[in-house]
Image: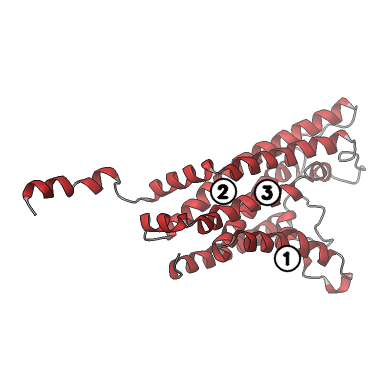
Amino acid sequence: MSAAMAARLAPFPATVAGPVTQARVVRAEWVKLRALRSTRWCGLGAVVLITGLGAAIAGSGAPYHVSAADSAAKGVSASLLGLLFAQLVVGVVGVLAFSGEYGTGMIRATLAAVPARLPVLWAKVTVLAALVLSVTLLCSVADFFIATALESARGGSAIALSDPGVLREVVGSSLYLTVVAVIGLALGTLLRRTAAGLSVFAAVFFVIPVVVGALPQNIRGFAPYLPSNAGGALWGSPLGSAQALSPWTGFALLCGYAVVLTAAAAWQLRRRDA
């Protein structure tokens, strides 16, 4: 090879592509997630379910009509009932974030560009968590102020963020949905098929809690440790059992499920072909 040809070819890859860094991978994953139509539709669905359904419940007069013995946080958790449905929406986004690439075959190009593989998973977790946390936090805060405004307009008692447990429930609802989305991502990475990932997610967060709740009291002592019930203790989920864990203990357990599943996904990603 002549010196002139070597001079033309050698610098080309470094100039165009540059080194593969975690920041570059995060930027690429953000572009991919933002470009998906499913992300936009699911984001809109989450807004409607959290804010719209919460406002509808508040407008009915039901959520804030609590007795003196009840805390203000109990009324807030009732207006956040839309979270039970919004968790399915964020779970869909999480599962599709990885399983969608396996379905289209794009995962081969992604892993060819990032041979180490694990930076792709960390980037997807970072981007997904940041997106879900910011959107759902805005929705939860908006839901709270809309619900309290409707209640005040009817002449009801005012509830403030400074009341015991209220701020925890508002922020906790967003934290809960963020971890749920990460669990969906881990399931999509492990199972690789969208249908399988969504089926397992729906079973864990919808079917199993309902079935366990219908069991006799003496044989459902494990109910508080289910992912949805454990995390639901942070925001007052109505599906939680009577022996619910304390809010932050339950949330720590939910985070533990997410860490274990993400670690399993990372192990599989490193060892299985795309």
Q: Quadrant of the N terminus?
A: bottom left
**As drawn, 244 above or below 141:** below
Mark number, residue 35: none
Label 1 residue SS: helix
Q: Which residue corresponds to mark 2?
A: 129
Residue at 84% from the left image edge and 42% from the top image edge: 75
Q: Which residue corresponds to mark 3?
A: 89
Model colouring: secondary structure
Label 3 residue SS: helix
Total tally of numbered discs in the picture: 3
Residue 131, image x, y percentages: 57, 43
N-term-proximal mark, 3 vs 1: 3
Q: Quadrant of residue 223?
A: bottom right
Q: Give the residue type at disc 3.
A: Val
Badge 1, how many Cα within 10 Å: few under 14, some, many 20+? some
Mark number, residue 225: 1
Badge 2, how many Cα within 10 Å: few under 14, some, many 20+? some
Q: Give the residue type at disc 2.
A: Ala
How far apart are the alpha carbons under marks 2 and 3? Answer: 14 Å
**Which residue of the protein is positioned furthest toward the bottom in this rendering?**
219
Residue at 83% from the left image edge and 36% from the top image edge: 56
How far apart are the alpha carbons under marks 1 and 2? Answer: 23 Å
Q: Quadrant of the C terminus?
A: bottom left
Residue 9, image x, y percentages: 17, 48
State the residue in front, 173 or 55.
Answer: 55
Q: Give the residue type at disc 1.
A: Tyr
